[in-house]
Each structure stands twice: as structure tokens, then as C-alpha cells.
Image (cartoon, grey):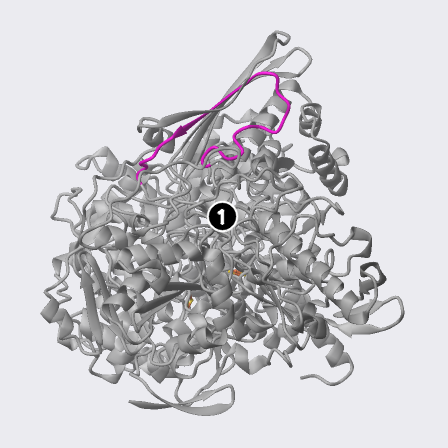
Amino acid sequence: MTPSSHLPVTRRNFLGGAGIVVAFSLAGMSTARGAATGEAEPSGTGAVSVLPDDLQPFPYLDSWIRIDADGKAQVFTGKVELGQGIMTALLQVAAEELDMPPNLVSIVTADTTRTPDEGLTAASHSMQYGGPALRLAAANVRMLLLRTAASMLGVADTEVSTMGDGTIRASNGRSIPYGAVAASLSLHVEAVADAPLRQPKSYRSIGQSLPRLDIPGKVTGGASFIQDMRLPGMLHARVIRAPSEGMKLALPPRAEIEAIPGLHAFVQQGDFAAVVCEREWDAVSIMRQLMANPSQRQDENLPVGDIASILKPLPAKDYVIEKVSHPTAKPVKRLEARYTRPWYSHGSIGPSCAIAQMVDGELTVWSHSQGIFDVKRVASSLVGMPEDKVHAIHVQGAGCYGQNGADDAAADAALIAHLLPGRPVRLQWMREQEFGWEPLGAGMVTEAVAELDASNRIVTWNYDVWSPPHNTRPTTANGVLAGWEVTPAFPPAEKIPIPMPAGDGSRNSNPLYALPNMDVNFHFISNGPFRSSAMRSLGGHLNVFSIESMFDELAKAAATDPLDLRLDHMEDARARAVMMAGAEAFRWKTRRKESKFHGFGMGFARYKNLGAYCSVFLEISVEQNTGAITVLRAQTAVDCGEVVNPDGVRNQVEGGLIQSLSWCTREAMSYDTQRRTSFDWSSYPILRFQSVPIDIRVDVLPKPGEPFLGVAEASQGPTSAALANALADATGLRFRDMPLTPEKLRRALITL
Amino acid sequence: MIVVKSKRQIWLSALGIAGLVGMVTAAIIVYEPAIPPVARPSPSSFEVAEVKRGAELASIGDCVVCHSTDGGRPFAGSKALPTPFGTLYSDNITPDETTGIGNWSFAAFQRAMTRGVARDGSHLYPALPYEHFTHVDDADLQAIYAFLMTREPVKEVQPPNDLLPGLGFRPLLAGWKFLFLRKTAFVQDKTQNNEWNRGKYLVEGLGHCGGCHTPRNLLGAEEHGSDLAGGVAEGWIAPALDASNPSASRWDQASLFDYLKNGIAGAHSAAGGPMGPVAEGLSEVDDADVRAISTYIASRMKPAATPSAKTNANPAKAEGTTASKAATRTPASDAAKLFAGACGGCHMSGAPMETAGRPPLSVVSDLKMDDPRNAIKVVLGGITPAAGHGPYMPGFADALTDQQIADLLAYARSRFTDAPTWPDLAAKVSVIRKEDAK
Amino acid sequence: MTISLDVNGERHTVTASPDTPLLYVLRDDLQLNAAKYGCGLGQCGACTVHVDGNAVFSCLTPVAATVGRRVTTLEGLGTAEKPGILQQAFIDEQAAQCGYCIAGMIMRAQSLLSYNPSPSDEEIRQHMQPNLCRCGTHYRIIRAIKRASAVLANHQNKGDAT
Ligand code: FES
Ligand code: FES
């Protein structure tokens, strides 16, 4: 199916069409996963005898899969497509276990009235946790289909098998299509944990690079995105806010605003304000006209200066992440270093958008949020309606990479629609609003102290990380802008970091390396100068950057090859394999520096120490006189367990690599004491075509039969680290403060 | 480099005459001896501090702009410098011994910089602004030499110059020099402070600002006595840097400093056209030198006023945009509508550029000039910061017709300035569009 | 006011204020999805369409300025069932992640191939510079453009240039 085909034309029409499913799923609601699971790892025991985490609250098979009389399957997932290709990969998993051709399977993604609540689509969890749930549900369905077919064909259960084409054949040669079997089979039964899974050697779908389902529509102008959704009678809204977080805009009296030609309605509640128009350009123009009014900073002034001096003095809550101690040989060398990264913008190419409609006392919100069930909870608390009167439906948006403005825009739209019942209202944020108000990826500081003994073993590893929150995902109105603006306001909730092992600013702060003495501490700064929340890989980006930079600094001190130093301290066989496979493909051992400012670097991490393993190798040259970096070659090797769609994995890793190069070399939210001053792509430049590596290769290691491991964020940390390491190799200088801009490099290199 | 290109066109046109004069009257100075090659000095033979100073001086002189191709290695030359008389290609000034200046002694370098003669004794085209570099101290030339000799050598031979027949005959250049090259040392003005004098030294010497900002006589030399009174560069008008500048009263040392250092000053324009790379070069220069340049230029623009760093109120705010003057949202004329759709996204009051403190059109000098050339060029080609950040504007050459651009500009001129209308705008747009297409 | 437009070879009449950027008319009045709002500032290329064969930012092109000129959007290059050469190349290379930038990318690339059917890598990078992708799909986009270029060359050799 194409993505456009699940854009409902009207709410009425979709509710009508899906009535049966609604009834089934509401049964599941009572046991719904608790709100606000955030990005923490599910707490399931992992034992074989229990259902996968995502399946436990929704054990009924019909919450996940429906088979029509014509033999087509519909699969329901609480996970959503963010451009990571998950829809295709999950469909492949379902097709595999149903043993059906993928083209007979369609997939419905997060919709609070139709699909299971699988929490957020984030943290590279979708394959790791969503995959097994759907897989087992499908395996259960296939098992039931086989049993029912056997009795219909009058043979024993062991005499029937699925053929991969949507039919079941008995050993006596008779066969029967799924549709006919499904007609006499109720799927309103609970899944069992031991339904037989299909085995790797007979896979038909898993492991194939099935072309993404959504791409044909996206390259031909299909209605692929929420931005493309048009409901009959739809109005266009723009929300009116000061240019930046922390400021307040003075608005003229309501009557004056209401006199502006082209305005359909001016919506105001407390400090929340929006203009609503029949025509989108009118909404934009009127918004701009109102934006010409003066803004004043409300919050205390922003601190300026280097990031360590800003963050380290702030009140922090301390967490011990890792403490081990073993007797070792005497240290002979000691290295200390501090690493930092600035605040980053998610920088989605499409600013956040949402559509909402209030009709007959029910509110529906269409959003590209990663947490569609939370959108519903937020909206219901914001407008004060019971949860069963509020529905939220996911529709794809532009890539978000974490919590950008999507949730705020959804809440904005819900509030506007609630104040202006009847017609659907489409709200899109403007580019500058996204830059000015979205939660940022947090600026961070780390400090590492490491000691080597005489035989170049690392004997001490002390590490501290300071970070504002990486997860302020909203679960009620107290987590969104509109909630803070309405009267009475919903005061922001206390911020709590995601605990380890997933971690927050602490993510990946515990090295995977086997080190005899470790003292790793996380200093959680609950109130940083900016609103911050999840952005691809969270604290893992700087933590991996720091650990992997320090490993290279140690290798230099020890005069050993950086790969050898890593392997010498790594016991995890899969980690070793990923490093060695990448090194082999890159020809690391035979690398040769060809000129003064030419060099090589590597980085490695296992994402969260739980997800995919990823090694990145870069060959670069730096232009001394301009500071411009050319990435000549990028090679990565990835182990993400069983690979469902190899090309999909490559696409994600490659994209993460390019994005990480952009973060590392040019990005930083700029600000002065009053406001964020990055407001467009000239004040927040990201990587453009001319800086893309000349050559990129991604090798995905086959791991048939292994559990799926989340991969979408795996290359962020290792890539930035590999770049810093390659720079050190090319220039002899160590750069520890991102972004490593051409200006910074030029200044350092010009006299070398 | 601004200098260079603008000058190039004019001096080449004068070259014929000058050459003749030169042949007749100055045969005696045509001959310059070769200076013997030296072994490339080892990079470590230069002091790091001197190299660093040389780097800054080279940025003030903007050597890299003419001596590199787009995407090519810096200082390796080969940049095509098109002229009505053909195309020149800049020299490789990396220390490669065979294709660059690796075997040039300091004496050879100094002679090239101040007298326009290559090591082998051949005359250099005045694309190299040696008539400005005559003012440069030996110590500064030493530093630039140290800087260039410590670059990575790049082996690159520039394509042969492609000039009209006869003009490739370099001895002609001796005549040009005889007429126009005056070797003068820089003289301090005792009545001014050190900063001012430093500024004057940089402006007249390495910075060679006059190359663009000074008008030229018929023979293509900078007019004596009109220095910094305004000129042309790469088809752009280089505005006067004296009191005759229509915006002179609003520039001061602080805003000039911002402009030169960051390519933008909130209450003024963003640096566009050939000024973009100049500001980019200056962003690499020590603040004190940029301040000195600003001080000197400010004094030229406002001779009476004492250069002071008074704060820069944003005139957009001062002019008080009252958004609540609501009912006039729908633009009245066709041109106003064109403007609202094409330019309003950035330049309407309340648009993000303005709320972020970027210069409002009411202060942009291009709109105030008597000649619409710069305004037309910016609308056609936009402003692209080479470093990837800083003020940016898309070009409209492909989106709008000549007449539409003319209508937009006429509207903007009348709305944002008190100046009289520009005549024959559409025709001028069409001429400049053709120039740019070359 | 009523404005008559030539979009993808068809004549359309819309009622819109003449200052309305073409982007909004395409999306809201003509219900064409491809051109996207990304920045409205001419900085990202998500809104790229062709006017008289040149790639322009539709977010900064007032609709009145396109009267009497030919507008082409991604929809004019082909359909999901019958994709154009570049569209097919993007499918073959799976050159999309979220895909939000892709319509603009294809239109930008199309303008390159129309005057330079076999661009070098460097020419492709240079030409594509105005368009942003946040997902990091650039490398695949370059590959897709090269693939389309090869297909074009093949057609040319066979004499069935399109
Ligand atoms: S939306 Fe037009 S360039 Fe970004
Ligand atoms: S594919 Fe997402 S922005 Fe390009």
C-alpha cells in the first residue's frame, strides 16, 4: 500500500471504515502500556516463556493482524515511519512469519483507535522491540491458520504447510488460500510465547532489500506527508510567538487584530495566540505583521561563554554510572581531557505540522510525533477532555531525529481546534519558529582521565559527563509550549533523566571496553539555559566522541595503533568483529599518509551498549589555508543482529554518518544573552552537497538468527569520533570542542 | 582582488596607448635582470609568529581570492581573470619550485610586489596591484613571504594567458608602469593617532581598497586626488568611502568594524558581490587591524566627527513598525504585490530576517545609490557567503523577468528611500543580466 | 483576483492574491503535493519547481510573476505508475529517507540534466548545493542523478532521446 492510502479523507469516513478494529483495540486499551515510558529500555525479563515487551499489554492477535476474506493481511503497529524505513521492515517481518508475499500485506501505523500503543518510535527501539512483538503475533496467526486449515482439509496438523504465496497445502496435494481459512478463524485470541518461528534457512522476506513502500509516492508527488493532507473545509493556522524561547511578544489589542483583512479567527487563551485563515498565505502574512511587534526577554538572561563554564557551575544531580576497581600494575602515563558539544537543532527540513478537528465533542489530532499516544494524552489534558474523546493519528512528516517541534505543534493545533470547533485546522510552524522554539539537542561537557601502565594497558578510567536533559518528551500538557502559555498554565514537570542502561546524557558513558578501574559519573543538570530533549543518540554522541577520542589520545601516548589499543581492551567478540571487518574493508593496516594534512581515523561504539555495533573509518584531507575538510573515504561496518532489510540498514547508517559529520563540523545553535540567534539556514548552516564524502561504504554483517538490534542511531557517535581522530592524525592537533569549524581549524593550522 | 579585476578591464584598454608611450620613452626601464633562483627555504627557517602575522597580512591583501580557482587549492593560481582583451590566469604563488615561487628569494618577491617584476625579469600585469604594494613595509613583505613560503607546495601550471594579439608582449607593461607606478613610502600623519595611521597604511597599502573604491582616469590608473571617491569592481559599484557616500552619515567606526569583520552590520547592508570575500578575509584578521581600518575609513566618511564607538540602534526599531496598523495588509499596487510575494518572506516588517536584526531595506545602501547597478546585481545573483554561513540571499535571475525585477526595485526604492526614481530600469536589468551570463 | 496558470502543461485558473507565493497556490489551490514548504526563504530548495525550464524557489516566486510562463512540478515528470527517468533512478537507488527534500532534489537535478546530460560528480555536487537534506541522503541522491544520466546517455545512443 502507498502511504497516501492511509491518509483518511475525513474522520467520519475513517471511523466508519475501521469500526470493528476500534472495538477490538479498545479492549486492549485497559491494559495499555503506561504513559510516558520515555526512551527507557523496556523492563521485560527477556525470558523465552514470556511474550515480547510490546506484545504483553496487547496480547490479542487481532490488535496486530487481520486477514481479509480475499487473503490480504493488514498489520497494525504502534511504531511509525520517520523516514527510517521501519514500515517496510516491519511489514517484511510480518510477511515472513505469515509466510505471505509482502505485496499482500499492508501496514497501519500508530493510530490511537486502531493500533497497539507501543510507546515512542525512538531510541532505535522499533526493530529491537517492535519487531519481535509483531513477529510473534504473526507467527501465532500462521500457527492458527495452519491448524484451522488442517481441520478444514481433514488432515493432521503436521500434514500442512504454508507455501509463501498465501496458501496452505496439505501433503495430499490439496491446498487452500489464507482468505478461506481466515473466514472461519477468530484472531481475537491471545498470543502464546512458543508459536514456532520461521527459520533463517527458509526465509523469504527477511534479509531481502525490499524496496521501501513509501518511496514511489515520495518521488512522484504522492500525498505522503501530513503537510500534504487536505481535509474538506480545512483552515490554515499560524501560531504567534516571540522569535525565541524565553521571550514574549507584545500583541496589539484583540479588536485591532480582528480587523485585519483575510483573518478568519484570532484564537487566544492566556499567552497562547494563533491566527486562523481560509488561505495559508494570509495566515503567514498576518502572522508576520504581528511579529513586527516588540519582544522582550522574560526568563533570566542567557549565559554566554564557553560551554564548560556555562554548564559546570549549574546545579546538578549526580549519578554514579559505573564503578569498578581491580588491582593493576602501576600507571606510568596519565592523560586528561575535556570534550564538549554545543546545542544542536534537529533541523528537520519540514517544519512541524499538525491538523486537528473538533467535531461532535470529539477531538482528533493528526501529527507526525514520535509518540502518538502521548499526543492524545497531552491534548486531552491541555483542553480538559476525557481521553476517550480524543484521538491521535500518525501521519508521516519530514525526518525529525528526536523531539523537535512536532509535539508542540500537535498541542497547538489541538488547542486551536478546541477553541474553534467545526472545521479542521492545519497548523504549520514557520522555519524560524522551529529554530526558535523546538527543544534542542543538549549542549554537553565531558572530562576524562586515563592512565596507562608500562605495557600500555589502561589501568584507570575516570569520566564525568555534565548534561541538561535529553528527554523531556511530553506526556501531559505540562510538557508542551501551549501548556505553559494557557491560563491556568501547566507548570513544567520535574525533569528526570532516563535511567541506565539506556541512559540520557549518560547514554554510552560507560565504555564497552574492559577496563579494570572505572569511575564514571553523570551530572544531570535539570535546568539548562535552553529547552532540550531527545535528539538522535542523545548523550551517546558526545560520550562516544569523548571515549573514542581519548582512546586515540592514549594510543598516541602509547605509540600503538589505535585499532590495536581498542582490540587489546575489548572482550566482546561481536565488537571485535565489527572493528576488524571495518578495518579490513578500509585497508586500515596498510594505510599511508600521503601528505602533510592527510590522515585516517576510526571510531567505534555499540549503541547504548545494547543496540547495534558500528565501526567507522575515515580518510580525510584538510586544507591548511581554509580549514576545509574533505572526507575522501568513509567505511563503516555494522552488526545489528538479524538483518531484515540490508539496504534499509545501509541507508540509515549512511544517513547517520553524513548527519554526524554535519553536527561535528559546522552546527551550533547560536545565541546572545536575549535569544537564540540561529533562525534560518544561514545562521544555522548544515552540511551541503559539496561537503559530502567522496566515497561511502556501509558493510552490514549477516547475523542470521540473532535478535534484531536497533541501528538507526548507531553511526552518530562513532562518525564524529572518527573525524576528530582523523583530524588529529592529519594535523597532529587534537580538537575536542565541537563543532570543528573551518575557522577553528584554519586558525590552528595556518602556521603549521 | 577587487581592485585587480576592476582595474584589469580599464588598464587593459589603456594598455595599447601606454605601451606605445612606453616603447618610445621608456625603453630604458624595460629591462629588468633575472634574480638568481634560490633553494626553497625550509619552512622551519621562519618564525611561527612571523608566519602568523604574514597570514593576517595576506588576508588583508586577499591574495587567496585571485590566486585560487573555485574549488582549487589555495594560492595555486590559475584563476581565470576575464577582460575585454582576453583572459589572464593568476600565478601559482605556492612555494613549488618549478611551477610556483619556491625558488624566489625575498628580494625577488619584494621586487614583484612593489615593482611588478617576476623573478625571471619579466613584467607582471598590473592585475597584481603593485602600485598599492609599493607602500608596504619590508617587514610586512617579509612576513607575507614567510607565510607563502611555508604553505604546502602545489604543482600547478596556469593555462597560458589568452590575450588579443600583441597584448601578450610583456615589455609593453614597462610603459604602463612608467606612467602610473609611483614608488612612494607610507608617510605617517603626526596629527592623527596610531590607530588611524595604521588604518591608513593598511587601506592604502596591502588592503588596496582604492583599487575598487577609487575612480580611474582614461588610462586606467587611479585618479590622483580622488582617492576612495568610489569606483567599480567586477561590474559592481564600489561606493565612495568618503563623505560623498549617500549613507556616510550613518556609518561609524563601530558599524564599519562589524561590517568588515562579519560581513554584516545590523543597521547597514550585508557585504555582497566582491565585497563578500573581502569581509571573509578580514574575519581572519586581528581585531586591532580591522578596527584601525574602520577608524581610518570612518574618518574619511565623516571628516568632522570624531570616530567614536557609539552604539548602533537598529533603525528598523527606531522607525517604529507598528504592526497594529492593521488594515493595510493587502498591498496596493502590482509592484507592491510582487514585492510582498518575492521579497516579503524576508524583508517585510515582522519577517524573520528583520526580527533577527538583519539590515532592513530602509538602511541598505544599494537602494540609495544613484546607479541601480548593485541593487540589480544583488536581486539577480543573490548573496552567497563562500564560507557557508553569514548573510545569504537567493538570486532571482531564473524566477523573475527583467521587467518584474525592475518593478520590484522601483517599488523598493520608492518605499524604502527618499531618492528619486531610477530611469530605464528594465533595460538596465537586461544589460546586467547579459553581463552576468558571460 | 483570478489568475491563469500553465502548470505541467495544463491551464489552471485560481483565485488568489497576486502576491501569494507560487508554492501555496500549487499546494493549496492546485492540490499538488510535491513542492514543499521548508523555509520560505530560498535557502533549502524543498519548494523547487521549474519556471520556463529553470529551477526556482516557488516559495519566493509570487504567483502573479508566473503568468504567461511555463511551470513544471515534480508531478509533471511522471507518476508512481509511470515514473520519469530521474524518478525511476531515485527509486532504483532508494534515494530517500524521510523524502521531504526529494521533490525539490529531483527538480533541481532535472534542471542540470536538461542542459548537461552527463555531469561530472563535481558538477552534480556544485549544482545541487542550494538544496538541503537533513537525513543525509546526499550520497544516494548523487548516485541517482548519475544513474539517470547513464540512462539518458543510453537512450541517446539508441537515438530515442526524450
Ligand atoms: S521552502 Fe523555498 S527554499 Fe526553502
Ligand atoms: S530525505 Fe529527509 S530531508 Fe532529505
The residue that appears at 40% across and 38% down in the rendered structure is A443
* Disc 1 CB within 8 Å of nearest ligand 1 atom: no
* Picture residue at 36% right of the left edge, 70% below the top: B379
Q: Quadrant of residue B410?
A: bottom left
Residue furthest top in the image = A330
- Identify the subunit bearing mark 1: B
Residue B223 visible, this angle: no
Give the image location of residue A135, x and y in percent: 66, 54
Residue A369 % position (x, y): 43, 57
| Residue at image point 23% right, 55% down | A242
Q: What stretch is highlighted in magenta?
A: A504-529
Q: In this view, does B326 lie to the left or right of A442?
A: left
Q: In this view, does B434 lie above or below C68?
A: above
Asked if the magenta segment contains residue A511, the reply would be yes
- Residue position for label 1: B64
Residue placed most toward the observer, C74 or B202: C74
Residue A566, percent across and down?
A: 67, 27
Which of these two is toward me, B206 or B380?
A: B380
